[in-house]
Amino acid sequence: MASYLLIESRDPFDSNDARFCCELATQLAQQGDAVTVFLVQNGVLPARVRARANELSELAKAGIEILADDFSLRERGIPFDRLTPGVKSASLDVVIDRLADGWKAIWH
Amino acid sequence: MKVLNIIETAYRATLEEQDDTGVWLAYTMKGVGADLDVLLRGNAVNYAVKGQDASGLQFGAWRQTQPPRLTEDVSNLISKGVAVFIVSEDLRERGLEGVPLVEGLTSVRRSELARLFGAYNQVWHW
Amino acid sequence: MSDKKTLTFALMDAPYENARSTTALRLIQIASKRGYDINVFAYEGSVFLAFAKQQRHPNAMHGRNAEEENHVLTKELVSSLMQETVRNGGKIDWVNCGMCVDERGAGEAVEGVRRGSPADFWKMAEASDNTLVIGTRG
């Protein structure tokens, strides 16, 4: 079993390929890997509660940890307590933690 | 250490650089002994299409003498021993089924990517 | 205090073009505060992050002169991160891809940045605990 950190900087409103991370995260989890999706930059835009085209809750239901960079959220005026269910705010330190722990890190 | 390099963005500055800088980097690292392979996904699957011609750029008296030859570069990667995977659905979505492609590619389905990634120590997305 | 690690970052984006360069520097900042050993391979436009000739300018929209605007100069962020890393007991090797430097005329970099090649990047990655590539987009 491997551990993957998928850093998602794209959002589904601007990029059709934002689905890549969601699909990959699901596949990896299904094969038994640990997966964290870390949203950063505009990647946090779908984390606003009631944002359209939101697959993030489905990922969370599948047991995938979804974190959103607290600075990116604050920068965009997205309150930490008004996030899509399943998404938690987190410090960018988590990315360095996971890199230090040897997680396979893929920036998208 | 075995690394899979994902190339997705296509035709970004390839005319100015005269190659794709992700393909170039993989080729160069292989040349110094790196153990790596390449996955073409998204628009970069178009790099495998034969018959591309980027020649003829001219600005005033300046003429480009070495246009990019992306398909040839992909082929050279394969000749150098780099496995080049290509996502089949991305080809199909772009109308590339049945279109002549570079020889030696290894087709993978999206559903196989997780397993493919598991075969590498690191996965770098350029 | 965290165990000491060695991390390598590969960057591609020029400053002032998109959010990726800032996020990359934020990540390097976190690693530098921890005293990690850090390698940076600056590829393509990111060779300009450490370009020594960056200059401040005023901002008429904000009604600020150059001093008041205090515009971010990424060369200063790079220098500051280098100092922070050393101050916290780490080492930092910031390598600009030589060919990328040449074609962009970006040869003048701040002190501590050296010129290198993809061979350097591969060596850095092999010798690191982990590597993060922050690719660019067209």
Image (spheres, coloured by chain):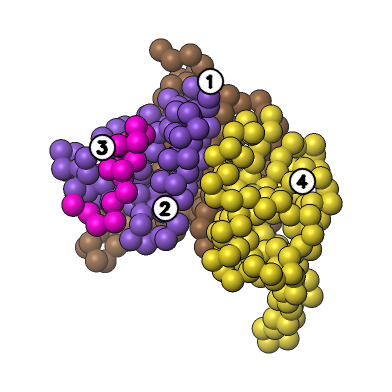
Residue extending furthest toward the right = B79
Front-lying residue, A60 or C116: A60
Which residue carries the number 4 mark? B82
Query: Which is more foreground, mark 4 or mark 2?
Result: 2
Q: Earlier in the sequence, mark 3 or mark 2?
A: 2
Q: Which chain is brown?
A: C
Query: Which is more foreground, mark 3 or mark 4?
Result: 3
Which residue carries the number 3 mark? A86
SS of the residue under disc 3: loop
The amino acid type of the residue labelled 3 equals: Gly
Chain for mark 1? Answer: C
Residue occupying image coordinates x 75% and y 49%:
B27
Would you say residue A63 sits in the magenta stretch? yes
Percent x, y of residue B41: 58, 55
Front-lying residue, B57 or C47: B57
Q: Residues at marks 4 and 2, common chain?
A: no
In the rendered image, the vertical position of residue A66 relative to residue A48, given as above or below: above
SS of the residue under disc 1: loop
Query: Which is more foreground, mark 3 or mark 1?
Result: 3
Which quadrant holds residue A15? bottom left
The amino acid type of the residue labelled 4 equals: Val
Which residue carries the number 1 mark? C5
